[in-house]
Image (cartoon, rainbow, N blue to C red):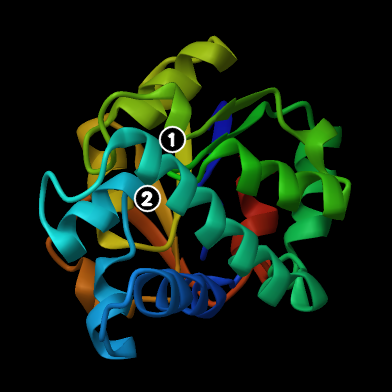
Amino acid sequence: MHAFIFDLNGTMINDMEYHTRGWMYTLNDILGGNFTWEEVKPQMYGKNKDVLVRMFGAGKFTDEEMNRLSIEKERRYQQEFLPHLQLLPGLMEFLKKTYQAGVPMAIGSAAIPFNIDFVLDNLNIRHYFKAIVSADDVVFSKPHPETFLKAAQLLNVEPTECLVFEDVPKGVEAAQNAGMNAVVLTTTHQAEEFKTFENVLHFANDFTGNFFSSLLNN
């Protein structure tokens, strides 16, 4: 592989519980909904605007209102998550070794820049990444391949030479649609949920272990 592309939430950091808390606060406390944790959790994928449309239906909010609600949700998420903010075990070492090996890296995430900046700057890891593709940089969310294809383009690497790190089936599907293999971090989904995909090379709980060392020896 000539380049690595990382999803952010659930892949580099295990923060999905805190996103759920942020959405519960926004949907119920701000907007007066009566949603349960079990109803909210499966809907947290794609752009924030997509989540609001899925929960309340199209036409309920203006773009301006959805932008404001999106920021409110992320503020709440950051407030909840900051005391626990850390990379998955082994990832800091993997980033350092990958960087030293000269393998270019990008982030390809459905998160808004506000959240990506929160992670990169608080953990001081921005310098490892040559390209960042956020929700604001694409028209189509995963499983559309736009996020990963754009990352490959910015890295000046062929899509087939990129390896994607993901944690959700729609992300792995996006990688497959882009012609890329994937490594799955099982923070939010179990291996059996990915059995329909042919592009998964490996499943792991975190970034420790010999597999990740072997990626840099190829």
Horizontal side of residue 189 vs 209, given as left or right: left
Horizontal side of residue 175 vs 216, given as left or right: left
Asked if residue 78 is positioned above or below residue 136 in the image, the reply reads: below
Q: Position of residue 15 (x, y in %)?
A: 58, 71
Residue under the point 68% across and 76% down: 80
Residue under the point 31% across and 49% down: 46
Residue under the point 11% across and 47% down: 58
Q: Position of residue 175 (x, y in %)?
A: 31, 40
Horizontal side of residue 57 vs 217, given as left or right: left
Q: How many neighbours does mark 1 have within 10 angstroms: few (below 14), some (14-19), or many (20 or more)?
A: some
Residue under the point 88% across and 47% down: 124
Name the amino acid type tagged 1.
Ala
Instruction: State whether residue 207 appears in this view.
Output: yes
Q: Position of residue 185 (x, y in %)?
A: 48, 67
Label 1 sits on residue: 135
Q: How many neighbours does mark 2 have within 10 angstroms: few (below 14), some (14-19), or many (20 or more)?
A: many
Secondary structure of the residue carrying tag 1 is helix
Name the amino acid type tagged 2.
Asn
Label 2 sits on residue: 48
Q: Picture quarter containing residue 107?
A: top right
- Dot placed on the residue nearer the N-terminal end, 1 or 2: 2
Alpha carbon separation for disc pair 1 and 2: 9 Å
- Residue in the foreground of this view, choosing between 171 and 84: 84
